[in-house]
Amino acid sequence: MVLGTDRRILTLAFARMADALGNSFLIIVLPLYIASGQISLDGLVGVELLGFVLREETLIGLVLSLFGLLNSFGQPVTGRFSDRLGRRKAFVLVGLVLFGIGSAAYPFLSSYWTVLAARGLQGVGAAFTVPATVALVNDYAESDTERGGNFGVFNTFRLIGFGFGPIVAGILVTGGIDGQDVVSYAVSGLTVSGFVAAFAVAVLGAIVSFALVTVYISDPPAAEDAASKDLSIAVLSPKGRGLDSVFVLGVGTFMMATTIALFATLEGPIRTRLDESTFMFSVQFAAVVIANVLLQVPIGRASDRIGRRPFIVAGFVVLVPAVYAQGVVTEPLLMLAARFVQGIAVALVFAPSLALAGDLAGQRGSGTTLSVLTMAFGLGVAVGPLASGVLYNLGGFSAPFTAGAALALFALVLTYSQVTETLDTGGEGARSAPQDRSA
């Protein structure tokens, strides 16, 4: 899977895997932690705000969403500064420190607002880490014909952490695959709850990532040259042929990420509807990522040979029915299948999209260009849980997934009509098409 991959790419991939493991723990643990009674929701549940009555699911969605909102809106700023300063590594390390502090704080918090603040701090940390890390992956690519493969490897390891983290978190918090209640552990004579153990793993993930980046990663010369580039983010194509391809990919990535994140907020309703355990819900959540782990590398490398656009379009075609199905299935295994098919769709879209944006970053800063997609993904992950809670309150169980399928359909139309190919595959092997660099 990783044969021939640059060791620096592998190091970044392992670092992001450890970091993503800690973050995905919190996606499963925080809803349980808030609902456990250890976090006070007094004066919030049942309050009417602008004609809308707040419920526990909405408050949980807000916590999950705040991370992505701050992460997303901060990424264009940090991505641009990392281009200007040519100091990707420093941005990654600062972000990991902030994330680790937030994770370490949770066991000592007792109010909803302090949990919200800790999650917000982690969102700011991610805004430093994500665009700088992805820019490093792009900077380390020696040619366009290996960029898709590099992003495939990087995303695979990152998603291993993100995908298997929820499964491990469910087992750690409840003490087994069939557990329903939070357990405690005896550690050096102290009794530690499953929640505290999960938060400790999140801190450990940040520490491992920090160590790997500190020891093995350095800023490439390409990053230092970025200060002379045009670091603006275009909406319209410079050639006047509609929308800019990177901008359109950002919109599509946002919609794709939103559909992924609809699931997490509805843990309680989904478990009740399907009559399943916390572990089974964790497996369903992880199914999207498991599909990506299996397919990111072969799809990324195939996009280096065949082209980026065919995979992206195919991904959105598959995404529409996969998301809609999650709102109508009533059996745990059918939900698992729908989530896995959604993962196939995400794999078809994500690595080729990053590679296409990386192709276009030749005349722009890598941090600035790629932050459009990473920002969009984070924003979708932020909006998804909040939108899911609101739509569930307004329209019932199927409403969030029907809306998600509509977003995927819109992304398909937009991508098919506006995104241009960046590789000329007419000759032997894939090579860059200079005429499309300003697309």
Image (spheres, grey):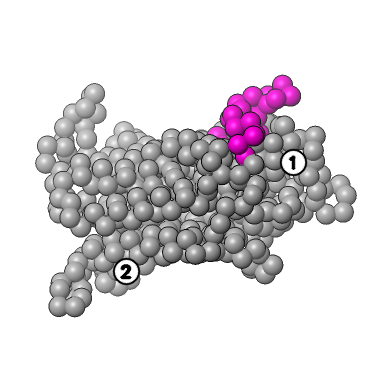
Image disc number at residue 8: none
Q: Is residue 197 above or below residue 232?
A: below
Asked whether 236 falls inside the magenta stretch, the response is: yes
Of label 1 and label 2, which has the lower sequence position?
2
Magenta-highlighted residues: 226-251
Q: Nearer the viewer, residue 30 or 199?
A: 199
Q: Using the numbered discs, state the Cα–Cα distance from disc 1 to disc 2 in whole angstroms.
A: 44 Å
Q: Nearer the viewer, residue 219 or 117?
A: 219
Q: Nearer the viewer, residue 161 or 123?
A: 123
What residue sits 59% from the left and 32% below the top? 231
Q: Secondary structure at mark 2?
A: helix
Q: Which residue is mark 1?
A: 422
Give the amino acid at mark 2: Ile
Magenta segment's dominant SS is: loop
What residue sits 34% from the left and 40% below the top? 66
User: Pointer 1: residues within 10 angstroms few (<14), some, or many (20+)?
Assistant: many
Residue at the far left: name it. 42
User: Pointer 2: residues within 10 angstroms few (<14), some, or many (20+)?
Assistant: many
Give the amino acid at mark 1: Thr
